[in-house]
Image (cartoon, coloured by chain):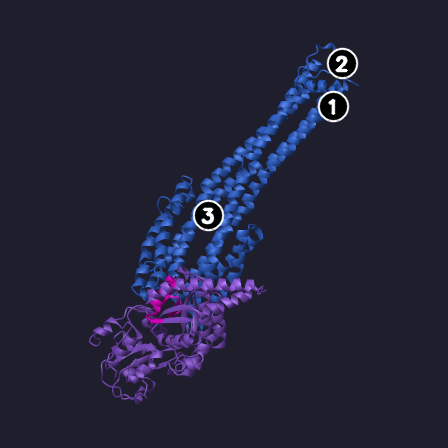
Chain colours: A blue, B purple
């Protein structure tokens, strides 16, 4: 219940025991020689401004985190996916078309369509990345891809023409030129884009869940709370009223908005932590494993078509297969460790690990055959389906890794969306509370002020 | 010798640097307003006037490279160009490792080489062809046995063992030849050889059985040919000269060698075959037939000049033709070496490709577009 001073003369300040000038509103008033109405007006303005400042800053903090989270879910994660998919599409296109012509001078339509689909996918991803990416490093890599992709497809088209005209060796040399373009220009550039987009994803994650701005907002909330408390105490001493309901209500609103902000932030942080730990991070390791598998496959195909006689590819196979895994510290191993227990990704990664082991065993004979100049057997081992060749194993392994990536992306999407949803209403809550706080403060102090008219 | 050349390189570079610095100081002292481009031009001239260039590789190209080196040294007295006849594989390895400035190769760079050393260039120097030689006593050199890839594959896999086999005598003009009842001794190269790459490529294009069982490459798993091949044939010949000498010494032999060894083969009383091309015509490795074969590939040749021209579409073309390549690192240890290489290679693909330099060994000049592609690649050489 609120008691008013209407009709009752305000207690004369002079009648109250005088105290030495001290801290707080009264102290300031004394030092500045302000009358009580002047002090109340100053208090009113201060409380309203502080409430609005809390709303503005707290709302801004919530907006920054929320928009970073939304960007993470709707921009950065899709761009990272596009970058991975673009690499995969280019690598698969090159391995598919080259192996198809190595196997038969008139390849089956399905293989040609797979190549065409890969190129179309790469072009679409490239277009999206060009319109969505903003880093300089990725920009130059994207420019290299934009310029290099038509050169690559042009060389492939020349190779296909030569094959169609009955000149397989000339066609083969064009496939060699095309594959070198893919290996030396396109795939390194695609890898750069993938790395850059992953870095952007991590940076955006930092923006969405960083502590600094939240702590600053909480400090402002603490300052606002202290001022509200001291204002109530001053009013109590000056007006003989125990409570100022308006200021109490404003304090409650402050507590609600701070609690909502902190809880929303912590919930989002937890969701993002789960999304990255069990979704994005293992998906990135799986993407690296996929890139490694594609490198192994691409090198083997290139080695056959160019009759390399060079041990570089065999050495690379040994190194890359160790990086891919399975095993502790390998990309597949790390992805397996990070999987959500019992989740769909765990089983898929385990299958990919098994498939990788048997595929390596089949691949290990490829370079041995080449080094012994057993070219026909080498070609069969690269282009034929299992059990004679490694082509089926590659498709199966890539399929398993791709499915595991999709499962992990699902985990990330779900968790990150939950995090973003937890952050999205915060700005509105904080701003609404701050406006109500301002109204409550204005109402509370103006009623005391009215007693002096 | 290679070590000596290697040791002299830093000294040459140092002398060049001192000379270039001295020139620059002199120019500055005279208050010249020479632009950097002019200084670079002076450096190139200076580099070309005192440099050592080492080349190793293809034994097929080696005689021609010797001719070029001698002529270039006469025109540029301060320049030393050393040529070492080894093999295409050795040439590529030496250029890649930096133990030679130029690796000569009959085959373009493999992807393994390119991916491992992305700065390697293969610059076409001239046009070559491969001959199929044989030793058939009593057969006039004016007559030429007609052969195709299928019959050659059957000879090299041991299915056809005698020269008077009906599968040989029934071919084209062979009906008019009195081919002897003599065992065929197929010779091949040992080690990594550009000649083997070209020869097995031809067999692979014309014989699906060879392609599916043996394939093509700088080395091959040669099928054993029982009862006919002596130790030399089984082991293979290390160089083009060895192939020539072995065939001269072995009646009934058949082998393959570059066009530059054709005059030696004729001197050794060997014959050479007319080969069936993609259009079904039998052609000899004459200048018009080689040029016709290459002409259809000129517009197709990519900027890095990697192209296989085996069994091409020209109806009058000889089926086994190729570019001879200089394998060079685009990034050289110093500006003097880069300039010296640029000057020498430019000379080879222009002045050195005139008929007067090529006619004795049977090579054919590069056409205008190929010279342009070569110059573009030479421009990429820098320090």
Percent x, y of residue A306: 38, 65
Q: Report which residue position mark 1 lands on.
A: A41
Q: Are marks 3 and 1 on the same chain?
A: yes
Stretch of the chain drawn in magenta: B83-108
Disc 3/disc 2 C-alpha distance (Å): 73 Å
Residue sitting at 41 percent across and 61 percent down?
Answer: B117
At 48% across and 58% down in the image, what residue appears? A186
Give residue A262's quadrant in the image.
top right
Q: Is residue B122 magenta?
A: no
The spot of residue A210 in percent (x, y) is: 54, 37
Q: Chain of mark 1?
A: A
**Distance between mark 3 and mark 1 Cα atoms:** 61 Å
Residue at the image point whose x is 61% and y is 38% from the top: A63
Give the residue number, with chain letter if any, for mark 2.
Answer: A10
Q: Which residue is mark 3?
A: A406
Q: Of callouts 3 and 1, which one flags the residue occurring earlier in the amino acid sequence? A: 1
The residue tagged with tag 1: helix, strand or loop?
helix
Q: Position of residue B274 (x, y in %)?
A: 35, 83
Give me the chain letter of mark 3.
A
């Amino acid at each position: 219940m609120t008691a008013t001073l209407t009709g009752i003369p305000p207690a004369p300040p002079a009648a109250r025991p005088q105290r030495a000038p001290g801290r707080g509103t009264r102290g300031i008033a004394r030092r500045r020689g302000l009358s009580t109405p002047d002090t109340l007006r100053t208090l009113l303005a201060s409380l309203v401004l502080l409430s609005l400042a809390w709303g503005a800053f707290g709302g801004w903090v919530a907006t920054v985190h929320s928009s970073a989270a939304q960007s993470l879910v709707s921009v950065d994660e899709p761009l990272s996916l596009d970058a991975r998919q673009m690499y995969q599409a280019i690598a698969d296109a090159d391995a598919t078309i080259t192996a198809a012509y190595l196997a038969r001078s008139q390849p089956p339509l399905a293989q040609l369509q797979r190549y065409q689909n890969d190129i179309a996918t790469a072009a679409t991803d490239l277009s999206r990345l060009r319109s969505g990416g903003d880093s300089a490093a990725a920009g130059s890599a994207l420019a290299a891809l934009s310029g290099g992709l038509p050169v690559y497809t042009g060389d492939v088209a020349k190779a296909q023409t030569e094959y169609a005209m009955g000149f397989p060796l000339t066609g083969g040399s064009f496939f060699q030129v095309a594959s070198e373009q893919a290996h030396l220009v396109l795939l390194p550039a695609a890898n750069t884009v993938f790395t850059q987009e992953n870095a952007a994803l991590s940076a955006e994650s930092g923006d969405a869940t960083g502590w600094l701005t939240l702590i600053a907002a909480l400090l402002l909330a603490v300052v606002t709370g202290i001022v509200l408390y001291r204002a109530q105490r001053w009013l109590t001493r000056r007006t003989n009223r125990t409570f100022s309901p308006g200021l109490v209500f404003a304090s409650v609103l402050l507590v609600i908005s701070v609690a909502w902000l902190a809880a929303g932030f912590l919930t989002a942080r937890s969701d993002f932590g789960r999304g990255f730990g069990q979704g994005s991070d293992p998906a990135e390791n799986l993407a690296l494993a996929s890139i490694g598998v594609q490198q192994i496959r691409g090198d083997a195909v290139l080695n056959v078509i160019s009759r390399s006689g060079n041990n570089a590819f065999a050495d690379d196979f040994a190194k890359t297969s160790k990086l891919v895994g399975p095993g502790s510290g390998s990309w597949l191993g790390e992805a397996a460790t990070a999987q959500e227990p019992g989740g769909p990704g765990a089983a898929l990664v385990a299958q990919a690990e098994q498939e990788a082991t048997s595929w390596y065993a089949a691949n290990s004979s490829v370079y041995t055959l080449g080094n012994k100049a057993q070219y026909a057997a080498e070609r069969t081992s690269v282009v034929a389906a299992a059990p004679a060749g490694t082509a089926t194993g590659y498709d199966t392994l890539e399929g398993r890794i791709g499915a595991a990536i999709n499962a992990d992306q699902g985990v990330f999407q779900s968790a990150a969306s939950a995090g973003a949803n937890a952050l999205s209403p915060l700005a509105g809550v904080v701003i609404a509370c701050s406006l109500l706080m301002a109204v409550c403060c204005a109402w509370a102090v103006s009623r005391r002020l009215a007693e002096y008219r | 010798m290679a070590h000596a050349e290697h040791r002299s390189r830093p000294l040459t570079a140092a002398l060049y640097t001192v000379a270039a610095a001295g020139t620059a100081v002199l120019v500055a002292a005279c208050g010249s307003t020479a632009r950097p481009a002019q200084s670079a031009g002076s450096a190139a001239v200076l580099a070309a006037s005192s440099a050592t260039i080492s080349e190793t590789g293809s034994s097929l190209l080696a005689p021609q490279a010797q001719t070029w080196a001698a002529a270039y040294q006469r025109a540029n007295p301060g320049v030393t160009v050393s040529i070492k006849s080894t093999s295409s594989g050795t040439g590529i390895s030496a250029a890649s490792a930096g133990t030679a400035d130029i690796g000569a190769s009959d085959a373009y760079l493999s992807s393994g080489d390119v991916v491992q050393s992305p700065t390697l260039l293969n610059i076409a120097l001239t046009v070559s062809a491969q001959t199929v030689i044989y030793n058939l006593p009593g057969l006039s050199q004016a007559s030429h046995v007609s052969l195709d890839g299928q019959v050659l594959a059957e000879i090299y896999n041991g299915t056809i063992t005698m020269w008077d086999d009906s599968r040989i005598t029934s071919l084209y003009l062979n009906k008019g030849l009195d081919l002897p009842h003599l065992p065929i001794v197929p010779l091949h190269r040992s080690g990594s050889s550009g000649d083997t790459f070209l020869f097995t490529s031809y067999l692979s294009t014309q014989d699906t059985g060879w392609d599916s069982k043996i394939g093509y490459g700088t080395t091959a798993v040669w099928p054993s040919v029982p009862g006919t091949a002596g130790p030399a044939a089984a082991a293979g010949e290390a160089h083009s000269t060895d192939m020539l000498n072995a065939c001269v010494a072995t009646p009934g032999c058949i082998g393959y060698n570059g066009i530059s060894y054709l005059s030696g083969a004729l001197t050794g009383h060997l014959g050479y075959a007319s080969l069936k091309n993609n259009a079904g015509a039998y052609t000899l490795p004459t200048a018009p037939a080689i040029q016709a074969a290459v002409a259809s590939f000129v517009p197709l040749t990519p900027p890095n000049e990697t192209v296989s021209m085996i069994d091409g579409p020209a109806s009058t073309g000889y089926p086994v033709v190729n570019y001879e390549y200089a394998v060079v690192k685009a990034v050289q240890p110093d500006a003097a070496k880069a300039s010296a290489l640029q000057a020498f290679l430019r000379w080879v693909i222009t002045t050195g490709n005139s008929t007067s330099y090529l006619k004795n060994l049977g090579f054919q000049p590069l056409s205008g577009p190929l010279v342009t592609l070569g110059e573009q690649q030479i421009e990429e050489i820098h320090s």
